[in-house]
Image: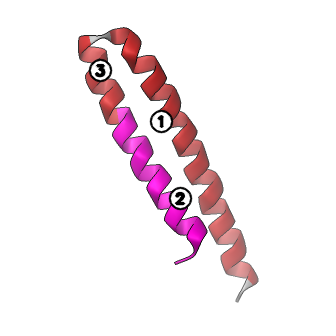
Amino acid sequence: MTPSLRTARACRAAAVLLAAAAVYAATHHSWLALPGLYTAAVFAWCAAREGAAHRRNGRAHL
């Protein structure tokens, strides 16, 4: 497992947890959902970039 894959998995888990928290926050205070969804989107983007880096670096070592 490369460090990029580890980071991608952590970012993906954080994105899922933040999205769940944003959905929960939307039921109580709708204005709190927006920062949570934005942060979840940023973590999802980071996970996609790190996943691509893992695939790119994995092929280079074969």
Q: Position of residue 40 (x, y in %)?
A: 47, 36
Q: Amino acid at mark 1?
A: Ala
Q: Which residue is mark 3?
A: 25
Q: Position of residue 25 (x, y in %)?
A: 29, 20
Q: Is the stretch drawn in magenta largely helix, strand or loop? A: helix
Q: Amino acid at mark 2?
A: Ala
Residue at figure coordinates x 46%, y 60% from the top left:
9
Q: Is residue 58 above or below residue 27?
A: below
Q: Is residue 23 above or below residue 5?
A: above
**Secondary structure of residue under mark 3:** helix
As measured in the structure, the alpha-carbon distance from the residue carrying label 3 to the one carrying label 1 is: 13 Å
- Whether the magenta-drawn stretch holds residue 39 is answered as no
Look at the numbered discs 2 and 1 and tell me whether their residues touch, using CB distance below 8 Å: no
**Secondary structure of residue under mark 2:** helix
Q: Which stretch appears magenta?
A: 1-19
Residue at figure coordinates x 38%, y 36% from the top left:
18
Q: Which residue is mark 2?
A: 8
Q: Residues within 10 Å of mark 1 (few under 14, many from 20)?
A: many
Q: Position of residue 14 (x, y in %)?
A: 42, 46
**Secondary structure of residue under mark 1:** helix
Look at the numbered discs 3 and 1 and tell me whether their residues touch, using CB distance below 8 Å: no
Q: Which residue is mark 1?
A: 40
Frontmost residue, 34 versus 59: 34
Q: Is residue 24 above or below residue 9?
A: above
Q: Earlier in the sequence, mark 2 or mark 1?
A: 2
